């Protein structure tokens, strides 16, 4: 597959098209917290620990089920890929607890 270029926390990254955002971040050394994601098992997106805010998408997305695409911008972060310090992400986690 061809490589795509995307942005996470202001950093330009490259990964093969179709790579899950959580895997692309991990390959770039960006840690994404997740309880329910295990490579090789079916995707659950149940824990919502890996939610991210992606430009031009109206709702928070789960990094464990979102494939990277050309020009994608993960802009809802303040310190890491998962957006743990982002207001929407923090609210989503508190609401689900």
Image (cartoon, rainbow, N blue to C red):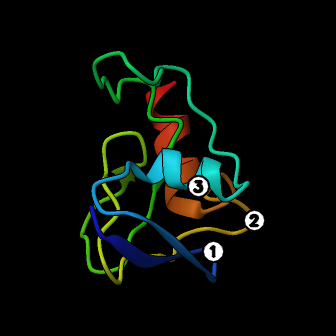
Residue depicted at 44% across the width and 34% down the height: 48
Foreground label between 1 and 3:
3
Sequence-wise, the earlier of marks 1 and 3 is: 1
Residue 25: mark: 3
Local secondary structure at mark 2: loop
Q: Residue at x 31, y 23 (%)?
A: 44
Q: Tag 2: Cα neighbours inside 10 Å, few (<14), some, or many (≥20)?
A: few
Q: Position of residue 57 (x, y in %)?
A: 25, 71
Marks 2,3: beta carbons within 8 A: no
Q: Is residue 95 above or below residue 72?
A: above
Q: Nearer the viewer, residue 39 or 3?
A: 3
Distance from disc 1 to disc 3, alpha carbons, whole Å, reads 10 Å
Q: Which residue does the numbered mark 1 point to in the structure image?
A: 9
Question: CA–CA distance between discs 2 and 3?
Answer: 13 Å
Q: Is 62 situated above or below 73?
A: above
Q: Secondary structure at mark 3?
A: helix
Cα separation, mark 1 vs mark 2, equals: 7 Å
Q: Position of residue 93 (x, y in %)?
A: 53, 38
Residue 79 numbered tag: 2
């Amino acid at each position: 597959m061809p490589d795509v270029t995307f942005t996470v926390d202001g950093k330009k990254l490259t990964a093969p098209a179709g790579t899950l955002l959580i895997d692309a971040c991990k390959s770039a050394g960006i840690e994404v917290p997740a309880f329910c994601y295990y490579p090789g098992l079916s995707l659950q997106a149940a824990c919502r620990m890996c939610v991210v805010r992606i430009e031009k998408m109206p709702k928070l997305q789960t990094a464990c089920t979102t494939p990277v695409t050309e020009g994608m911008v993960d802009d809802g972060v303040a310190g890491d890929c998962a957006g743990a310090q982002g207001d929407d992400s923090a609210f989503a986690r508190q609401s689900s607890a």
